[in-house]
Amino acid sequence: MAVAATVGITMLGGGAAMRAQSQDALGHGYSRPARSPHGSRSEVVAPHGMVAASQPLAAQVGIDILKAGGNAIDAAVAVNAMLGLVEPHMNGVGGDLFALVWDAETERLYGLNGTGRAPYEISRETLVRQGYERMPGNGPLTWTVPGAVDAWHELLERFGTMELADVLAPAIAYARDGFPVSEIIQGQWAGSALALAQWPDSAATYLPDGRPPRVGEVFRNPRLAATYEAVARGGRDAFYKGDIARRIVAFSEANGGYFTMADFEDHTSAWVEPVSTSYRGYDVWEVPPNSSGILALMILNLMEGYDVAGLGHNSADAIHLYTEAKKLVWADRNTYVADADANELPTTELISKAYADARRKLIDPERAATEVTPGQPFEHSDTVYLTVVDKDRNAVSLIESIFGSFGSKVVPGDVGFALQNRGSGFSLEEGHLNSLAPHKRSLHTNMPGFVTKDGKPFMPFGVMGGPMQPQGHWQVLSNIIDFGMNLQEAGDAARVRHSPSLQPGGTVAVEPGVTDEVIAELRRRGHHVVRAGGGGMGGYQAILIHPETGMLHGGTDVRKDGQVVGY
């Protein structure tokens, strides 16, 4: 299968096969004068630098940094800070991040784990004594130390060319002067209004005049501006060792939380070795656990054993096999994805081809599984995503999140941001690898992706959206590699999401573009299938460095307010 040639031709013009496949695009009501008449829009193509982000003002901030002489790392931090302002329900300095960085000078890919840990004074036993059988979904008991600010420091210290104050300046200005709230963000913001209203500081920050802002209405966050200004002046220590941490700890002590100053003072990010697998000649890279990135690699390994292109895009056979592969991977996820510092994890075995070959034998091509158990891989007994590529072809794939919508729903005092509820990802099961323990990282859904080809950077990409992320990684990569779609078409195409539910074997949600005939066949095989629209299918961004022309190609998700900008 001449995949590399297909991708190259696709980016430069495409053909009849691609036009046939594009009928599955989300925007199938369109009639564009293009090779894919049913897509939402064209790829963005540019020669020098490119930013893809889930909100247009944030993408523009990144391009401004690149044009001012900053590199991809400088721009990525600036974009992330801006997203914390304009998309506050998804991310912010109260959350964590992971990043993959391609450094053009060393021609290497680097991984950064910028996630925080549980308080020293909390444990599984602490919550069990209070009557909890599982982790709560929000509130101070779900807090872990926010890792984003220290991760910004690490990124700029190692690879950046600008000062933290310079890259925070645009977000500070917008926080002071205000920005118009965009459509999809407004709808999701409004969906959390009742929960935010339960906490006075959350309401004061995010519900001006007692309600969420309307579409196009200017929103200001002077409290966040003050926090950013303190970090701009004092660096990461202003956040972790200064007044910001002290105010968070004081709020925690007054509201049933377990934070102490030691939790913040001892926080560190970790540079990690990315992990990878190959898929039809492409090397796909992810951050190792506690990130869920290995799940995407495991799905790729399982699906590589099938002629996906021959099955047809979003055919009943393809969706069935993918869904069954996802079930197998999720059984392992719930058992083996946890804090690598606190556990011995079988990561190498889980992402091996041999393990995939053994697990693939459990997939029945004609019948949906209703119960799946984890394998034995040991050798012994909502989130924001952004990507930036600069003129030197440094590239950043970065994902940052406060987990739930507005995280824990709690803004601790007048700091201007909500703290994440990442602690809700812990288990209270005794002996579980992901069981809550002092100073431990929880399982993380976040996972930036990166593709290389023949040792060269090919495509930083990501799909935000909680447990949809590994599923989205597989689907957009298959769209590009198996079906020759360009980056925009790969994001526009209808997606499928499998989720646990009360139904045996879970529920398969499908977007418009999956035919009634396919749904009927999936149901015949035992799947519970529902049609889905709106949210829940992730938010995708990608930038491809074209291997033949060297040009940058970008795509962004129609399910978000996002934008790709190049120059």
Image (cartoon, rainbow, N blue to C red):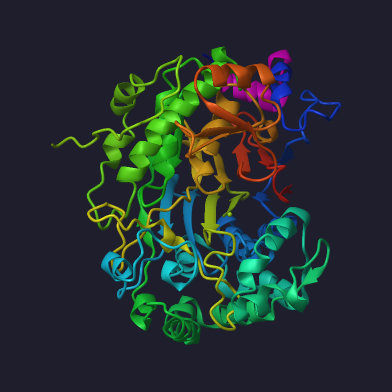
* Up-down relation of residue 524 to residue 409 (above or below): above
What residue range appears in magenta?
Answer: 4-17
**Residue 174 shown left or right of residue 346 in the figure:** right
Residue at position x 57%, y 48% from top?
464
Q: Where on the picture, by quarter, is residue 64? A: bottom right
Residue 480 visible? The answer is no
Q: Where is residue 427 in the image (x, y as percent from the top left)?
A: 34, 56
Q: Where is residue 252 in the image (x, y as percent from the top left)?
A: 44, 81
**Residue nearer the viewer, 117 or 409:** 409
* Up-down relation of residue 97 to residue 346 (above or below): below
Q: Where on the picture, by quarter, is residue 250? A: bottom left
Query: Which residue reaches farthest left?
Result: 381
* Up-down relation of residue 302 to residue 119 (above or below): above
**Residue nearer the viewer, 14 or 491:** 491
Instruction: Give the dominant element type of the magenta stretch: helix, strand or loop.
Output: helix
Q: Does the magenta stretch include residue 322?
A: no
**Residue 415 shown left or right of residue 264 in the figure:** right
* Up-down relation of residue 377 to residue 171 (above or below): above
**Residue 120 shown left or right of residue 281 in the figure:** left
Residue at position x 49%, y 22% from top?
526
Q: Is residue 5 magenta?
A: yes
**Residue nearer the viewer, 160 or 426:** 426
Q: Where on the picture, by quarter, is residue 327? A: top left
Q: Where is residue 26 in the image (x, y as percent from the top left)?
A: 72, 32
Q: Position of residue 28 (x, y in %)?
A: 78, 28
